[in-house]
């Protein structure tokens, strides 16, 4: 999808996202969105597209590092609970508790018993969240191995993107089929009526973002909330030419029109 067409299609969605955020604040709604999927699928770009027009004090992105030694001894879901949304908040999880069913299982960071316990407990945990009124959305961003390899190569060649490549990414490249099997087992155990999974095709990342955002907005109730009037008084003096003056002038650069 061409960028010009993408930006044209994204703009009206951005207005709807801002309206959604205004509605969530006015009604005290708690919105939690989980983004899982293949490495390089496009989680970061989608999260940015959703959050970039919303007040960052209201919309939080959660991307947790690997657990500490202390966190490894805790109840598995414990490290995620403090990040859940309060009234009026939107929380976007860039990966989530589903690490246990994905990378931890495939790369051997969790035992079979731990994974089995997680698949049993996750639906019960999410039932508690949704019963308490949290609106929980779970998205899996899907891309085939050919597109994944192209994106890995792009990151390898671009100095501005190499930070996205981790040692786990390098090892995981040869485990594509294992990740597929882990995903299917995860879907079978955790796709529920109250917290279903939604799979989005991300072979075309721009089209995938638009599809996911449209789906998210369509699954919410009517978010139309009247905007409050803002009393904007007139200045009682003429506008000043400069904010301040310094005794010792500092260099001032004009933007290059070229």
Image (tube, rainbow, N blue to C red):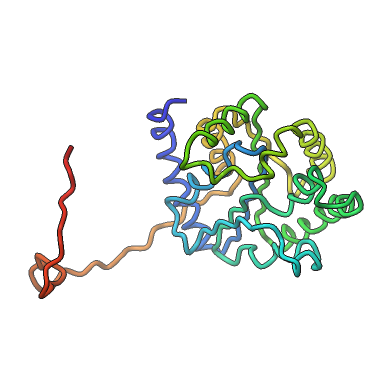
Q: Residue at x 72, y 42 (%)?
A: 197
Name the side, left or right, on which 93 lies relative to 246.
right
Q: Residue at x 77, y 37 (%)?
A: 179
Dividing the picture into quarters, in which one does residue 250 lie?
A: bottom left
Q: Position of residue 23 (x, y in %)?
A: 50, 57
Q: Residue at x 90, y 49 (%)?
A: 112
Instruction: Count every numbered label the image shows and give the total.
Output: 0
Is residue 248 shown above or below 196? below
Is residue 168 shown above or below 63? above
Q: Position of residue 34 (x, y in %)?
A: 65, 49
Q: Residue at x 65, y 55 (%)?
A: 135
Name the side, left or right, on which 234 lies relative to 203.
left
* Residue 231 appearing in the image: yes
Q: Position of residue 223 (x, y in %)?
A: 51, 51
Name the side, left or right, on which 219 lies relative to 71.
left
Quadrant containing the C terminus is top left
Dividing the picture into quarters, in which one does residue 239 lie?
A: bottom left
Q: Position of residue 17 (x, y in %)?
A: 48, 48
Is residue 211 shown above or below 237? above
């Amino acid at each position: 999808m061409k960028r010009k067409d993408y930006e044209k299609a994204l703009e009206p969605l951005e207005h709807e996202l801002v309206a959604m955020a205004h509605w969530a604040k006015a009604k005290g709604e708690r919105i939690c969105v989980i983004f899982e999927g293949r490495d390089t699928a496009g989680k970061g770009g989608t999260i940015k597209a959703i959050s970039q027009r919303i007040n960052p004090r209201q919309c939080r992105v959660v991307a947790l590092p690997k657990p500490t030694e202390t966190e490894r001894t805790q109840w598995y879901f414990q490290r995620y609970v403090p990040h859940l949304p309060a009234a009026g908040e939107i929380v976007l999880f860039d990966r989530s508790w589903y690490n246990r069913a994905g990378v931890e299982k495939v790369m051997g960071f969790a035992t079979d018993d731990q994974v089995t316990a997680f698949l049993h407990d996750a639906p019960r945990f999410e039932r508690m969240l949704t019963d308490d009124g949290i609106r929980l959305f779970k998205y899996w961003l899907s891309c085939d191995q050919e597109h994944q390899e192209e994106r890995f190569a792009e990151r390898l060649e671009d100095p501005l993107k190499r930070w996205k490549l981790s040692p786990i990414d390098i090892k995981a490249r040869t485990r594509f089929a294992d990740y597929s099997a882990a995903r299917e087992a995860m879907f079978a155990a955790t796709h529920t009526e109250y917290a279903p999974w939604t799979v989005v095709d991300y072979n075309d990342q721009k089209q995938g973002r638009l599809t996911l955002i449209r789906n998210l907005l369509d699954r919410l109730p009517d978010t139309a909330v009247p905007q409050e009037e803002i009393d904007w008084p007139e200045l009682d003096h003429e506008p000043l030419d400069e904010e301040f003056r310094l005794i010792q002038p500092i260099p001032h650069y004009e933007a290059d029109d070229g």
